[in-house]
Image: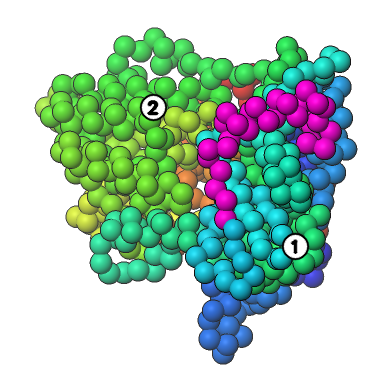
Amino acid sequence: MTFKDSTFFNRDLSWLRFNHRVLQEAADQRNPLYERLKFLAIFSSNLDEFFEVRVSNIRQIKKLDKPLRKKLITKPNKLLKEIKKEVFRQQEEFGKIYEKQILPALKENGISILSFENYTKAHKDFAEKYYEKHLSGALTLKLKDQESQDGLFIENEKLYLMTMTPSQDLIWVKIPEDSDRFVILPSSKGQHHISFVDDILKCQLYQFYQTPFYSIKISRDAELYIEDEYSGNLLEKIESSLSNRDTGQVTRALIDSTMPSDMIQKLHKVLDINDTDIVPGGRFHNLKDFFGFPNPTDHQLSFQELAPKKQAAFVKAKNLFKLIKTKDRLLQFPYESFDEVVRFVEEAAKDSKVTNIKMTLYRVSKKSAIAKALLSAVQNGKQVMVFIETKARFDEANNIKWGKKLAEAGANVIYSYPGIKVHSKIMYIERAEENKTQGYAYIGTGNFNEKTSRIYTDYGLFTANGKITKELSKVFQVLERKLIVPKTKNLLISPFSSRSTFVELIENEIDLANDGKPASITLKLNSLQDQKMIKMLYKASNAGVKVRLLVRGICCLVAGVEGQSENIFITSVVDRFLEHGRVYMFGNGGKEKMYIGSADWMTRNLDHRIEVITPILDPDIFQEIKNSVQLQLDDHVKARIVDANQENKYVGTSKDEGSQLLIYNGL
């Protein structure tokens, strides 16, 4: 993974280095044991999606005509080999962490994960009864002979056990999805014994067939390939395409690494795959199920919960509209409660002076209190307009469900545009006050989702400042197709003005540096991929601008290279909460400018999505955000250096409080 001489890291290999940072958290003994298990689960879940989506995209490149494919910078076969090599390294590291660190640590806490080979007679008796009661009626057996595999279909991301008979028939057993993944066995000698349900099945299946069974999981192409559709009803296309996730091309066969070679060769034929598609793993797959690993002890093995705080101003306020009109308000999630956002919509739904509520929904929770409040608003006679982004990957079906409910109630529901996503997290409310219309706005870096607001770090800004509200109203006019281009002086709107404004802001810092004045750029992003923006940052570095970046995930900029990026330093914080907020700060000759928004510096966010980025105009909020970002820039506990080799070295190994805990304690 050395790209020292390169101008840009490959985005997919860089993403894998991000997932390695997640894996590091599983190995970090400063984390409670069950939190380390959760990081294994996150790593596993991330990797599943990577194969379903990114590897699928690379495979589509392979389908292009050869002359066109040769013009591409990305060589799909070479890249797939590099991906497999890196994934294999990480799978090995995963196995070592699990076997050498997690299992012994569990044992020290009186918990043993037993494989069926180590079952005692009492465990075998228990397993047999458990099988008869919970599993025997739900098994799906697939037996295929050597000559014909017609009709054999292995479902996407489902767990199977597989073996091959002496006559080379394949036997597939699907692990029931509604069964508990972990089963607590009878305890003995002060140890609590836990078994994967897979092993209970293996124990019984071995008795039936007298042959060992091996774990296998198939990942299939999860892209819907609707991004470039410019005609027809997009909603109908998405609804009809969702089933493709279950039938798409195989992008990975994750197998038990002890599976015999003759079985693997048979898999090639049955699944129409090759060696590149085979990824050796451990005995068990879908380790994202570690999220639900039971704790039969009375030991405290998880983080102490950080209850979201309530701002005193919100608690005291009897009317949020009056509170926001007096002064802009900021919430930092998950450190502060998302309930205030829900309350804002609920108050708007009941307030007799509120006439209009407009909102974008990108990833809404399944039991969304916000969506319910919008239904209530419609029933109370408010004009409600909701833009539903049906192309929010893996949330399409849920978004469509809520869209239909709102439309049936009488809301004006607008669905995705072909060719562009609406990724902004915005709300605009109109209220009749003193014979005029007063606008109120909410602009966030994260989704209107009560569930993810407890685990993603985000900012949410409430404002009644006309400089913002009037321009946000124009964005909704674009979504309603009443306006083509929103002309704004304060808000940055992708794909109209975000890129050009960011370029101007960088150029201003370059001019300052060339004049011998202090110049600085500080960015907090999820991902940095856009090559034009990276080149601008290289240009700034060469001019002497101090560039400090916090990038959680993909980072295609190669930092610390002489003559290219020696003035750029990048760190990545991976901790108990998922870093998700985006902040953009520019020195501006001592009159600092700050923006927050939903856009990463990826080509898709700047050119192919509707994003809203707001300036921070309130000096108190400006300082609050600056302080929280500074804590992360100074993190010596959970920050990793993203350098020219992306080796993920820790900035420091302090046992003090990390930046996330410091931010929480400081609020």
Q: Are marks 1 and 2 in contact (CB under 8 Å)?
A: no
The three-letter amino acid code for the residue at tag 2 is Val
Q: Which image quadrant is residue 633 in?
A: top right
| Disc ID at residue 341 | 2
> Left of 560 or right of it: where is 224?
left
* Residue at 27 percent of width and 21 percent of height: 347
> Left of 553 or right of it: where is 481?
left
N-terminal-most mark, 1 or 2: 1
* Residue at 39 percent of width and 27 percent of height: 341
> Left of 666 or right of it: where is 256?
right
- In the picture of the structure, the residue carrying the numbered disc 1 is 166
At label 2, counting other C-alpha atoms closer than 10 Å, the crowd grade (few under 14, some 14-19, many 20 or more) is some
Looking at the rendering, in which quadrant would you find the C terminus? top right
* Residue at 15 percent of width and 26 percent of height: 380
- List x then y, in percent, for residue 218: 61, 57
Q: Nearer the viewer, residue 223 or 555?
A: 223
Which residues fall within the magenta stretch? Answer: 113-142
125 magenta-colored: yes
User: Is 114 placed above or below 582 here?
Assistant: above
